[in-house]
Amino acid sequence: MARYDHIIVGSGINALVCGAILSRRGRVLLLEREKVIGGAVRTGELAPGFTYDPLATTWVLLIASPAYGELREALAAEGVRFAATDAPTGVLMADGRSLVLTTDRAANIAAFDRVHPGDGAAYGAEMAEIEANAGLIFGLFNNALWSGAGARVLAREARRSGPRGLAAKIGGMLASSRRRLPSLYGSDLVEALFAPWPLHAGLDPEQPFSGTMAAVMAFASEVFGTPIAVGGAARVTEALAAIIARNGSEIRTGADVDAVLPGSDRRAVRGVRLADGEEIDSPSAICSVTPNQLYGRLLRDWSLPDFVATEVRRYQYGKGDMQIHYALERPIRWADPALAKVQLLHLSDGIDAVSKASNEAMRGMLPARPTVCLGQPTAADPSRAPDGKAVVWIQLPEAPRVLKGDAAGEIEVPADGAWTEAVREAYADRVEAMIAAHDPAFRESVIARKVLSPADIAALNINLEGGEPYGGWAGLDQNFLFRPFPQQVNHKAFVPGVYHIGASTHPGAGLSGMSGYLVAKRLTRRRLFS
């Protein structure tokens, strides 16, 4: 009898969801090479009394997923609570104009119409279209695509709309934000509200499907808000770890898996070997890693199809990510008081500005005016700071992984393209100046500032290659049926008993836990336990 029914490599959200479900019916061991669990989900102290999430923070994808439906009661029993305001997102332009999206559709329609007559009706029609196509859109995200369930999603839509109607729907879903937004809205302010959202899915405005992602994210924000975990994002991963332990399974940190081991016939998995030489038996290995790590390292002792090496070499990573965190004496003083409770505010001038900054970052340039994704967690969870004080969470999704220059011609970058402390802090100063333009006394309120460059982020976790947080380029040629590449069917690696989960697999990045959930449900149905 195997020591463990399943070994899971990694402890990000997908691994923990998978482990929590599988541990109900078998012995599971999660192995994490870092000293802490969670992958890109961490919580720390920014200054005494100030709690912050260094990387991921928003849980809308989990709450909207079937994984949460299955684990909700167990998480609540471990004390997990989510908090959100009724103003999930908004935009603030350089000229001071601002607009807020609330969780009230009627109020949103009225607000958009006040900005530009007809824009409210256009927004209402778009949300109605998302609702009408929810079975297709969310069916694709919540099912394995190469499966009977995936086929049934498409067949149901084909019966409902007819083959040509289904083709038209899919074609419409592939529209870019560049095409979709100007055709819907007459106001540059309303357009600017939605323009940055595809960045959170690793997409640029010109890429196929970016228009649909902007609409889907607006829809999800309106329905669920922008929830964060009370006390910090790590409360969720800690709770999942507690569920796993309560079910009699284990998690080990500081355990770097070096290889998945073949059995004597080299046709079945017999376990894994750690970097220190220890071998652990199991007939099943579920790996929450990038394709490079899975096929280039963990499965290097196996005979793999010839095309695997080529596909791994072709696998692309997108732009890097940069994070800036502030502990403040008081919340930011926005000119529009309504912005004070917006949980994720974008400082952006619209689709052209997002496109320009994204293009600069893809070419290795520090954007002259980046899209600033500014979170205000203490608006929803005041426990993260002392009374009257605040925490600000900033993400810059348009950051070069390797530096070639500065689009503004102000910051000197090293010849080797590396992120240095000097470049990191100078670029953070540029972002800080964008905030101070709206709150002139902002700098005086700063108690502490913590900046993470793409290089810093890459050092935190082996899967965050080059500081890229999405597990790989999210363009259409490397997404959905083609993630991580076309020959890999769902989450099955090219070795019996090995499964591939994480952001590099369908349905991609974000804190949904869905790839881990899909594999856990598959293994539960097949009763693959010793």
Image: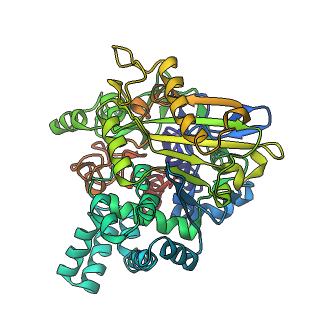
Q: Which residue lies furthest to the front in this view?
A: 95
Q: In this view, does 410 lie above or below 105?
A: above
Task: Tell me where residue 450 sits by quadrant.
Answer: top right
Report the residue at 37% width, 38% height from top: 269
Camera sees residue 142: no
Q: Where is residue 476 in the image (x, y as percent from the top left)?
A: 26, 53
Q: Residue at x 59, y 64 (%)?
A: 225
Tell me what residue is drawn at x 59 percent, y 75 percent: 104
* Of the pair 179 and 66, the residue shown nearer to us: 179
Say how the picture is coloured.
rainbow
The residue lying toward the viewer, choosing from 413 and 296, is 413
State left or right for residue 425 relative to residue 295.
Answer: right
x and y, in percent, of residue 64 in the image: 53, 65
Quadrant of residue 118 within the rendered picture: bottom left
On the image, the x and y values in percent for residue 429 come to 55, 29
Residue 251 placement, left or right of 475: right
The image shows residue 132, relative to residue 242, as above or below, that is below
Left or right of 78: which side holds 472? left
Rendered location of residue 297, percent (x, y) = 34, 28
Q: From the viewer's side, name the closer residue of 264 and 104.
A: 104
Q: Can residue 311 be spotted in the picture?
A: yes
- Residue drawn at x 32%, y 23% as measured from the top left: 404
